Amino acid sequence: MARRRRDSFLTDVLTIASKLPWKISLMAAVVSLALLHLVAVMTAPIAMARSMADMGPVVVHQMIHTFALLFQFVIPPAFVVGAAVSFFKQRRSVTLFKEVRTGYGRDVGSFSWQQFEILVAEGFRQQGFSVFEKGGPAPDGGVDLVLSRGRDKYLVQCKQWRAQQVGVTIVRELYGVMAAELAAGGYVVTSGRFTADAKQFAAGRNIELIDGDRLGSLLRDPVAGSAPRAVRSAAVQLTSNPAPQCPNCQTSMVARVAKQGPNAGSSFWGCGRYPKCRGTLPKVA
């Protein structure tokens, strides 16, 4: 039973490490090795207790030492293996993304659900998001991808449905998870279509629906997928003023609202490639 639990723990570490960005998994390997080695050194075996009353602390001390000594040869290598898996997965997703973006390869609608999730994940990475892939054969709680940009978190549900429309139940489920996890917004992405009820439910909420027609923008336009539409509305929608170009990289800018600092609440233009580019301009009303 103990062997099974240990194997399960190792499998969990490998799974998590393979889904994290490979640089983070590699960093986790270095940090875990340093910490476990330090604990092992600090809890080196001490002299035998002089009485039975002292046995308790000695036993606990020895258990901690043994744990740190053994796991410094288990956990860090697991993170290294996970980092390697993550690295090759990302290379594969970049290749797949480039094929679709250039029009070479199969139609997106013919992809398996695994390939579809990989493609969507890479699409969001190209928008400047950090992506954690939760998808897989196990239940995902209505979330396939977790995006982060700065302090904001966004949840994504992917549906590789071409023959079947995505209904309101899927959108409502994501909205519930967003509320539970305090996410700033969410996306439902499909290669097919959404029902009218799904569109009506998402309207006015911080959820953006990306169907087969709009999917091309996510995969081909490097600045199309910023925050969800409703989040952008809350952050001052563009009106009659056209978006200027970023003074640093010439990319179209996006209207934003400062969330903190002395200018909190005021609007400004921010580069559409943020955080890769941090160019800003004052927004004229």
Image (spheres, rainbow, N blue to C red):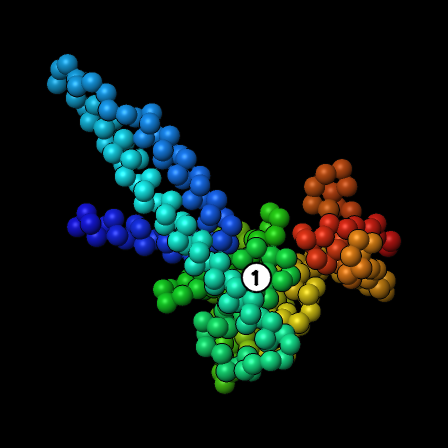
Above or below residue 171? Residue 26 is: above
> Which residue is found at the position 38% from the left and 44% from the top?
76
**244 with respect to 45 (left or right):** right
> Which residue is found at the position 44% from the left and 64% from the top?
135
Q: Position of residue 276 (x, y in %)?
A: 68, 53
For this rendering, which residue is in front, 40 or 257?
40
**55 with respect to 234 (left or right):** left
Q: Position of residue 153 (x, y in %)?
A: 56, 53
Above or below residue 155? Residue 211 is: below
- Report the amino acid beneath label 1: Gly
**Total marks in image:** 1
Of the 4 image quadrants, the one containing the C terminus is: bottom right
Could one spot residue 187 in this view of the protein? no
> Which residue is found at the position 80% from the left and 53% from the top?
248
**279 with respect to 129 (left or right):** right
**248 with respect to 76 (left or right):** right
Residue under pointer 1: 186
Could one spot residue 94 in this view of the protein? yes
Q: Position of residue 41 (x, y in %)?
A: 33, 27
